[in-house]
Image: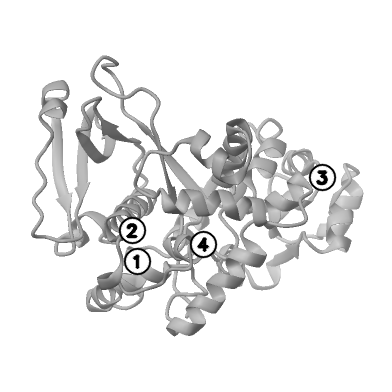
Amino acid sequence: MKIVRSIQNQIENALFKEKVIILYGARRTGKTTLVKSVLEKFGSDGKYINCESLVNKQALETTHIENLKTFLGDYKLIVLDEAQTVDRIGHVLKLLIDTYPDMQIIATGSSSFDLANQIGEPLVGRSRTFVLYPLSLTEIKNHRDMLYVESNIDRLLRFGSMPSVFGESEDESIDELDQITTNYLYKDILAFEGMKSPSFLISILQALALQLGNEVSLREIGQLVSASHNTVARYIDLLEKTHVIFSLNSLSRNPRNEIKRGKKIYFYDIGVRNTLIQNHNPLGVRTDTGALWENFCILEMMKSAQITRRKYNHYFWRSNSQQEVDYIQEYGGNLHAYEFKLNPKKKPIVPSQFKELYPEHDFATVNRENYWKYLIVDT
């Protein structure tokens, strides 16, 4: 099913302002579908170029401006899909935007570590960046209605919200997720590292999947995958930069009472996480529903912040005496703390040490009954 993405309007509003539009996101999140939806509005004035095509890649790997212009033509809007495959793409884009400021270019990339390294310096002040997540609750609600969202929450905790998965049967969802985790998700890292098999990456991700909701120990993961903690850290960094996983650091302003360097890791798609451990069982027979709900809520809050364009820092909190807060957003000069409890009958209490250290804070519990107040944006 085709669902209108919330950032499409933001991207369209950013066009033709003498900046290259950069669209990041993991593979299979719908970047190509999104940019083609933008292109549709320009008809014959728009052109789509798949940079994974060898012919297109080679044609773009030049700084000869006349050759570039001949290849690109006189289109108003040009999309360079999977632009990270083009060598020195940042310099090519800089040359084009400097020479033809009226030409609008959208460059997509799933591997931001490569694309950003090439683009960061050449395009300082010349680019606008967006990130495409899997489908959000807000997008799903706008596509159908709140009743449809409510009837699909359990399914989202089992199969995630990749566009090619959502709305399919359970068997088809599992098959598609297997394809995503086997053939697509790590393609850029494998090429970047010269690896022939994703087995090492999958081993690291499986270890992270099993530690969902807990603090991550690089040394423990290293022991599990027979690698140094430095190697594990490097691959976790690559997985973050390709939008497979994301991390939260611990909030620490009082080192005597709080952990200093804690880190939790979550997945940009819960269906991918469940596929890694081969567990798509119904919630009633699972032992990890608390961790799934925590991942789900944090991710949806990130998506909502993107829709509302709200910027914030985010953390988790734990004291040396093991008191915890699941999630904290810092904005407007205040801390906004959240606990995530799938079961609405569970009533968490704000940790006494947290109240003492941070008296100026808001606190809310997000559960199965009130999630829509915190995870869905009225648009």
On the image, the x and y values in percent for residue 290 come to: 27, 56
Q: How far apart are the two marked residues, 1 and 3, measured between alpha carbons?
A: 39 Å
- Residue position marked by numbered label 1 in the rendering: 157
Task: Tell me the number on the disc at residue 292.
Answer: 2
Question: Depth-wise, is mark 2 or mark 3 nearer the camera?
Answer: 2
Mark 2 and mark 3: Cα distance apart in space = 39 Å
> Can residue 181 be seen at all in this image of the molecule?
yes
- For marks 4 and 2, give the CA distance: 14 Å
For label 4, count other residues whose C-alpha is less than 10 Å away and answer few (under 14), some (14-19) or many (20+).
many
Q: Are marks 4 and 2 in contact (CB under 8 Å)?
A: no
The kind of residue on which mark 3 rests is: Asp
Query: Which amino acid, mark 2?
Result: Leu
Residue 276 tag number: 4
Q: Earlier in the sequence, mark 2 or mark 3?
A: 3
**Closer to the camera: disc 1 or disc 4?**
4
Looking at the image, tell me whether mark 1 or mark 3 is earlier in sequence order.
Answer: 3
Question: Label 3, label 4: how many angstroms apart (C-alpha)?
Answer: 32 Å
Q: Are marks 2 and 1 in contact (CB under 8 Å)?
A: yes
Name the amino acid, label 4. Answer: Leu
Amino acid type of the residue tagged 1 in the rendering: Leu
Q: Classify mark 1: helix, strand or loop.
A: helix
Of the two numbered discs 3 and 4 in the rendering, the one whose residue sits closer to the viewer = 4
On screen, residue 65 versus residue 233, left or right, reads right
Q: Are marks 1 and 3 in contact (CB under 8 Å)?
A: no
44 with respect to 74 (left or right): left
Q: Residues within 10 Å of mark 1 (few under 14, many from 20)?
A: many
Q: CA distance from mark 2 to mark 1?
A: 6 Å
